[in-house]
Image (cartoon, helix red, strand yellow):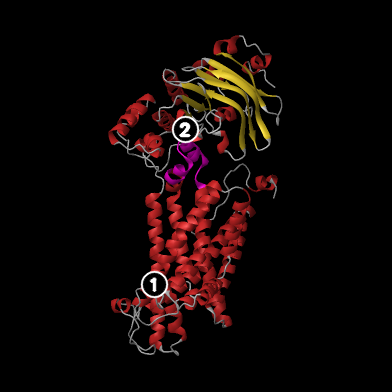
């Protein structure tokens, strides 16, 4: 069910500003890939190009190829809406829909796409909330507003919402940066479980987190402010954290950066 | 004042002398008494002058006393607070006075009979008659105007916030701004010219069209502000679920802002409900009940008020009716506002734990 992502020669622009330049990498199915690197180096931008969310920003533009198995996401006639159903996303700040209850939040993706069978929705809600390790905490308050949950619960609700539409790939943009250590742990455990079913890509500023959850790690860097960000190297997480092949990676990881 | 002087004044203490809590009230009462004294003594007729003297005295006394007891910084704080209060009271005076005058004069003839009868067989100089025909006319004209202006205005705002890029969006924004400034009589004349071209008699819907022109920019502006308040993260969350943009707008953006949008529409309705000029030109006024807004002259509340005042040659009965109609109009607008608040509260995103 999970799919491979194959990026080649990808550059992304904001208007005329090139934010990332010539990135190529392969992301294997059923793995967790972590993106690390200093702020502004284009990790999030690159992540957003993977499900065509980059072009939602005004002036956003992409060059290059992103293959999902054997389909080019940027090929002619590809519907970005269909792409986003295949490749889900979890954002930095928990953002449940404020007008909807917990239940409605989870089924939002299905309902907004026009699936309405009650029993199916009920099953999806239970399955997704269990998948996000949230079921036991919210099963008695499914009809309460989703924004009434705690921050960590909200973020898991957003994960449940994302996996409810059964994507092939799950992108996470610093999903734990707004959470306390206990909620972070809950989400990291969850990532470990989810990788059985999905291909997961996670952006993080927390290097211990990258080391804990990921199979492969990609290090991004930029030459100077105003220059486009580049992929420095991608390798097995163990190698990146023990014996990286590029000096800049070692400097960044060991804190000898800049 | 430097730190050193403060330290000299109150060595080793973080808390200085404070005026007691009741002091603003005492100063206010004192300055009011003095102002009454001055006013009566100097033989000033206008109570407004008394009030202004009291306000000035209050501000000066507050500053003086606070500066003496508490120090200069606290005195500035108190004078700023005092200014806010005085401004608040000054703003409140005309409002209370208006409502009070309208209520006290309006209740005289306001009863069920007045609300359920027209002016059909009652001469303007005689007592009796009512505003039923005007209420019907107002409801129909304002209702039709809302049916035209609210969807157009809301959709325009959706375009501007969600889709609008480049020249077209800038042009639309510009013209909405221009439309906001159109005087109501000009909107009336515009429709009147159309009416003359097509050789038509005055009818209710013509007034509705002019009112819709006045209402549209207000709806666009308020809706735009409300849509801008919807966090971008919600749009992105929905788009990332693979929801098309139009469904995102329909199911996420609009429900999140529906409370504010409703309030904006209701305020726009309140604004046009009191318009007289275009109604005078286009609907013309009618002494009888006309339930059909698409044919024949109608009446409306503001027009009724104007005609009762202007065409009755000073008959008291007509003045009483004008005041009662004014009261009805104010009540109508207030009920609309209350409804809008109710909807806003009911639809507002809930945080309940």
Is B352 displayed left or right of B69 in the figure? left
Q: Which residue appears at 42% of the width and 17% of the height?
A: A196
Answer above or below: position of A155 versus B185.
above
Q: Disc 2 on helix, strand or loop?
A: helix
Query: Which quadrant of the view contains residue A74?
Result: top right
Q: Which residue appears at 48% of the width and 58% of the height?
A: B152
Q: Which residue appears at 66% of the width and 13% of the height?
A: A246
Residues under labels 2 and 1: Cα distance?
Answer: 49 Å
Label 1: few (<14), some (14–19) or many (≥20) C-alpha neighbours in 10 Å: many
Q: Which mark is residue B200?
A: none
Q: Disc 1 on helix, strand or loop?
A: loop
Tag 1 residue? B293
Q: Are marks 2 and 1 in contact (CB under 8 Å)?
A: no
In the picture, the quarter occupied by the C terminus of chain A is top right
Query: Which quadrant of the view contains residue B4?
Result: top right
Is A248 displayed left or right of B22 in the figure? right
Answer above or below: position of B143 versus B309.
above
Is A57 displayed left or right of A111 in the figure? right
Answer above or below: position of A204 versus A238.
below
Tag 2 residue? A82
Q: Main secondary structure of the magenta part?
A: helix
In the picture, the quarter occupied by the N terminus of chain A is top left
Q: Does the magenta portion include B9?
A: no
Residue B260 x %, y %: 45, 53
Residue range of the region highlighted in magenta in the rendering? B229-251
The reply to whether residue B69 is visible in this rendering is: no
The reply to whether residue A5 is visible in this rendering is: yes
- Nearer to us in this view, B77 or B317: B317
């Amino acid at each position: 069910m999970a799919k491979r992502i194959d990026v080649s020669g990808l550059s992304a622009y904001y208007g005329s500003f090139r934010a990332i330049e010539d990135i190529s990498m392969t992301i294997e199915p059923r793995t967790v890939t972590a993106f690390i690197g200093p702020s502004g180096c284009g990790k999030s931008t690159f992540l957003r190009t993977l499900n065509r969310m980059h072009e939602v920003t005004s002036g956003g533009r992409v060059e290059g190829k992103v293959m999902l198995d054997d389909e080019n996401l940027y090929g002619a006639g590809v519907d970005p809406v269909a792409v986003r159903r295949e490749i889900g996303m979890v954002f930095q700040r928990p953002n449940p829909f404020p007008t909807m209850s917990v239940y409605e939040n989870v089924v939002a993706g299905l309902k907004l796409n026009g699936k309405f069978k009650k029993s199916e929705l009920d099953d999806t809600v239970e399955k997704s909330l269990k998948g996000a390790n949230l079921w036991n905490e919210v099963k008695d308050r499914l009809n309460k507003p989703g924004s009434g949950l705690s921050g960590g619960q909200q973020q898991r609700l957003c994960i449940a919402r994302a996996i409810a539409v059964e994507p092939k790939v799950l992108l996470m943009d610093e999903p734990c940066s707004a959470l306390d250590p206990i909620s972070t742990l809950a989400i990291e455990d969850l990532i470990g479980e989810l990788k059985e079913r999905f291909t997961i890509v996670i952006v993080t500023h927390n290097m211990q987190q990258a080391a804990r959850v990921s199979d492969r790690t990609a290090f991004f860097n930029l030459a100077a402010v105003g220059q486009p960000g580049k992929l420095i190297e991608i390798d097995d997480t163990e190698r990146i954290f023990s014996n990286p092949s590029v000096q800049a990676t070692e400097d960044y990881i060991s804190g000898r950066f800049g | 004042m430097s730190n050193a002087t403060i330290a000299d004044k109150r060595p080793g203490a973080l808390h200085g002398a404070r005026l007691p809590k009741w002091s603003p009230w005492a100063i206010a009462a004192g300055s009011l008494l003095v102002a009454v004294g001055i006013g009566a003594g100097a033989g000033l007729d206008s109570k407004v002058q008394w009030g202004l003297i009291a306000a000035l005295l209050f501000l000066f006394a507050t500053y003086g006393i606070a500066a003496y007891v508490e120090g200069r910084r606290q005195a500035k704080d108190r004078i700023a607070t005092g200014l806010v209060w005085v401004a608040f009271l000054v703003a409140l005076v005309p409002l209370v006075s208006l409502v009070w005058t309208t209520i006290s004069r309006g209740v005289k003839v306001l009863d069920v009979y007045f609300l359920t009868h027209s002016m059909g067989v009652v001469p303007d100089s005689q007592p009796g008659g009512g505003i039923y025909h005007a209420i019907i006319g107002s409801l129909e004209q304002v209702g039709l105007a809302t049916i035209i202006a609210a969807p157009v205005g809301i959709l325009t705002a959706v375009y501007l916030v969600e889709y609008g890029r480049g020249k077209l969006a800038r042009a639309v924004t510009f013209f909405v701004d221009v439309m906001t400034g159109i005087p109501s009589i000009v909107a009336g004349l515009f429709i009147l010219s159309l009416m003359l071209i097509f050789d038509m008699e005055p009818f209710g819907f013509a007034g509705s069209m002019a009112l819709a022109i006045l209402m549209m920019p207000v709806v666009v502006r308020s809706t735009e502000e409300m849509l801008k308040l919807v966090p971008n993260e919600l749009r992105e969350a929905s788009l990332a679920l693979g929801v098309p943009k139009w469904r995102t707008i329909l199911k996420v953006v609009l429900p999140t802002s529906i409370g504010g949008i409703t309030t904006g529409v209701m305020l726009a309705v309140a604004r046009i409900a009191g318009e007289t000029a275009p109604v005078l030109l286009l609907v013309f006024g009618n002494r009888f009940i006309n339930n059909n807004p698409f044919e024949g002259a109608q009446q409306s509340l503001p027009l009724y008020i104007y005609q009762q005042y202007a065409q009755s040659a000073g008959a008291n009965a007509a003045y009483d009716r004008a005041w009662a109609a004014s009261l009805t109009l104010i009540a109508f607008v207030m009920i609309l506002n209350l409804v809008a608040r109710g909807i806003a509260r009911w639809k507002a995103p809930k945080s309940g734990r």
